[in-house]
Amino acid sequence: MSRHSTLRRAPQQKRGQQRVDRILDAAAQVFADVGYEAATTNAIAAQAQTSIGSLYQFFPNKDAIVSALVARYVDQLRTVYDSVLEDQAEELSLEITIGRLVDGLIDFHLTHTGFMAIFTRSPVSEQAKATAEELAYENHARGEQLLGMFVPNLPDKKRHLYALIASHIVKGLMPLSDIQDEHFRAAVANEIKVALLAYLESIRERFNEDTTSDQQE
Amino acid sequence: MSRHSTLRRAPQQKRGQQRVDRILDAAAQVFADVGYEAATTNAIAAQAQTSIGSLYQFFPNKDAIVSALVARYVDQLRTVYDSVLEDQAEELSLEITIGRLVDGLIDFHLTHTGFMAIFTRSPVSEQAKATAEELAYENHARGEQLLGMFVPNLPDKKRHLYALIASHIVKGLMPLSDIQDEHFRAAVANEIKVALLAYLESIRERFNEDTTSDQQE
Amino acid sequence: MSRHSTLRRAPQQKRGQQRVDRILDAAAQVFADVGYEAATTNAIAAQAQTSIGSLYQFFPNKDAIVSALVARYVDQLRTVYDSVLEDQAEELSLEITIGRLVDGLIDFHLTHTGFMAIFTRSPVSEQAKATAEELAYENHARGEQLLGMFVPNLPDKKRHLYALIASHIVKGLMPLSDIQDEHFRAAVANEIKVALLAYLESIRERFNEDTTSDQQE
Amino acid sequence: MSRHSTLRRAPQQKRGQQRVDRILDAAAQVFADVGYEAATTNAIAAQAQTSIGSLYQFFPNKDAIVSALVARYVDQLRTVYDSVLEDQAEELSLEITIGRLVDGLIDFHLTHTGFMAIFTRSPVSEQAKATAEELAYENHARGEQLLGMFVPNLPDKKRHLYALIASHIVKGLMPLSDIQDEHFRAAVANEIKVALLAYLESIRERFNEDTTSDQQE
DNA sequence: AATGAATGAGAATTCATTCAT
DNA sequence: AATGAATGAATTCTCATTCAT
């Protein structure tokens, strides 16, 4: 897969793949604990219970670890979006779909500590910028796809803009799901759905007005 | 409470205050240029056209620079919110108020280039966490205040929740105002207003329903 | 001077220049002790009785230290060649000139431990290659100059070739001057002169034959 | 004495010896490509198309690889000198003999690309020093042998000194045979012969004078 | 007060060598 | 025997902070 392009050496054995996974898990944990910049490769190796040498046998540098981690996140995010999209076969309402999406994303966020540390970092190196782009793109593209299902015939440019806005709303709100208090977290989850739904409904309304008035002309 | 608490020495003379301001300007610039983590104290001193020794005469460490900068941002943000709040004497519509607020915040963001670099960093030290908290609090508190004006009688808890959501929507969307293309930026600005307005209207609706149904009982 | 171009920061104060010199002395010593590749920047700093940080304040990397050292060597070598060339005002014999040159070079070599370690290393980086080139060029160019004085009218191409050979003979023989035994060292010095003289005489002879035969034609 | 003393295990089977040879070939190639210091044992193993583990089954450490390679070089150099010495049965002139020797050495140098990288390195460990010594000794000893044939009755001490000088002249000049331009390389080869011959003739002359004057006394 | 040289802990990365499979 | 994953000491270089002048 594409993620392997960032690996120094594609692990041929099961053990190697496990080690790669363990390193990525460790990296995610360390990123979650201290943030991306403060995370050291030694800390990641220690967390992965491996040696620094082994880490560098698989990853040529720190950026590559993040790239691989992001590739994994993208794969897993895709699963979240896919499961929501599949449900669309049943022609569910926008409200229910948004509900499932937000629940899925919150669950993803809660089970993937470290994701936000990477998602919100300001990338420095060129490679880091490309990686950040990749991650942002996944959310944006999937948002566009979903939007296209609920508001068909939307001009490309508008769909692009609206999806950009929606994905950034989600990006801004996701960190809130970290909240410890369970009741409050549920309330927040609900508000995220409300906010997203409100924005999407506003898109629908405006689009209907536009097309209606077009017909009138 | 006063921002000067983070200063090693309160500059009693005008010259000292000017130097502090120049350092903060420099810090903001460097943060904007290379990001928070890549910014070095030496680079900040150089940008401020002072010596590293002088910098440390005013600030005990790097965190203190950020704290002071954030304190200044908080002051300046307050001005943005205040000007919007003052207009409320005229009892403007929610739509117009949101429009002014978003315009003000976008303008603030564009004229304070280092702001986002600090706002979105993952704080490491305890002091950094406190500083980040302070900044988040300002936005949240001011949001609550505004919300209270448009939906009076909202229970504290709900007002707190809604303002939290609203401030995070804004936080998520603000970085988009960086976009170079002027047309697209204007379109984005409009969508930010739409999204925020849509959410706030949903709050109003829900509140009216609640109170109406309350009355019916 | 040109050597400063490799410095990260031109030392403005006497103290700074002294420190640079001390670091270069230390580097020469360490190179002499363990060879170029085995020399570590920490060892150089320790030998210079300074901190690794100070070393890097003046030199951006290890290669730059060598470059500066070589620049100093080139300056000092120039002095050796100059003093020999100046004597030529007296129109000394080739034998005496070679004698003085070899004595000068042996003295230079004995008083500049570390020179050979750099002169004979195989450069790896591009910068190192350029530096090695510079050093080789100095010897070659000065050899050409001297040769031109003793065998005037030699075609450029030949002078270039002969000087190349002569400079490499010297390069090959110089390390022998390290020999501890004083008697043996003196004998070696004498043989170096003999060998160099023999080669240069052969050039003269061949050139005279050539020009003689040319005239005959 | 035997080169196998540096081997961890004398390969009893043909296959093992082939593997050892392949590793030495690989080492020579890598030394030629990147220089001695930059050569890694992993790169050597890769070039030899074997595993790093196998490499260490035959050689206890990196120095041992060089030692074995040098031992092979010494063997092969011996062949060059032997073929020249054998021709001496025909009582060829010094000029012709030098010509053959230099041609042989240049050919050796050109066909053994890794040789110079090892010959000119500054040895660090004790083992490396011993190995370097061994290589230098071979050239020196063979030089002495040849010198003895052309200037018989030379006192041991002088023969030793002269051979030392001659071997270092050759060492200094050999790297020049790397030159790409074929014409220039041929010219250089010729000059090497001229220089060496000139020195050896000077030895002869001095010896004849000495013995003549001895007789006169 | 101002300056900027000096410090050294700490970070990323390499590579000779070992050892489990 | 062969393999190549694993190890970690050692190396280069950075940068927050101190301190002599």
Image (cartoon, coloured by chain):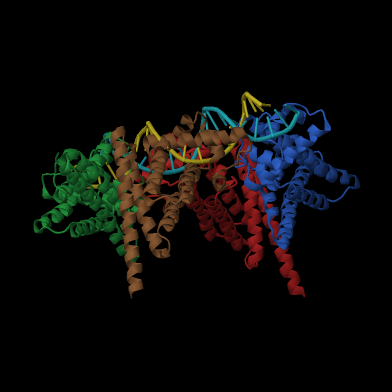
Chain colours: A red, B blue, C brown, D green, E cyan, F yellow
Residue under the image location 75 percent in, 51 percent down: B197
Residue under the image location 71 percent in, 45 percent down: B166
Residue B94 in view in this figure = yes
Find residue C173 and report its horizontal and vertical position in percent: 32, 45
Find residue D176 and report its horizontal and vertical position in percent: 33, 56
Residue A56 in view in this figure = no
Find residue C146 and report its horizontal and vertical position in percent: 43, 54
Instruction: Reply above or below: D167 against B9.
Output: below
Q: In the depicted view, which residue is nearer to us: D151 or A134? A: D151
Residue under the image location 19 percent in, 60 percent down: D96
Q: Tell me if C152 is positioned left or right of D163 in this view.
A: right
Find residue D136 and report its horizontal and vertical position in percent: 24, 43
Q: In the depicted view, which residue is nearer to us: D161 or A175? A: D161
Specify the quadrant of the image occupied by residue A118.
top right
Q: Tell me if C31 is positioned left or right of A202 in this view.
A: left
Specify the quadrant of the image occupied by residue B160.
top right
Q: Tell me if C169 is positioned left or right of C70 in this view.
A: left
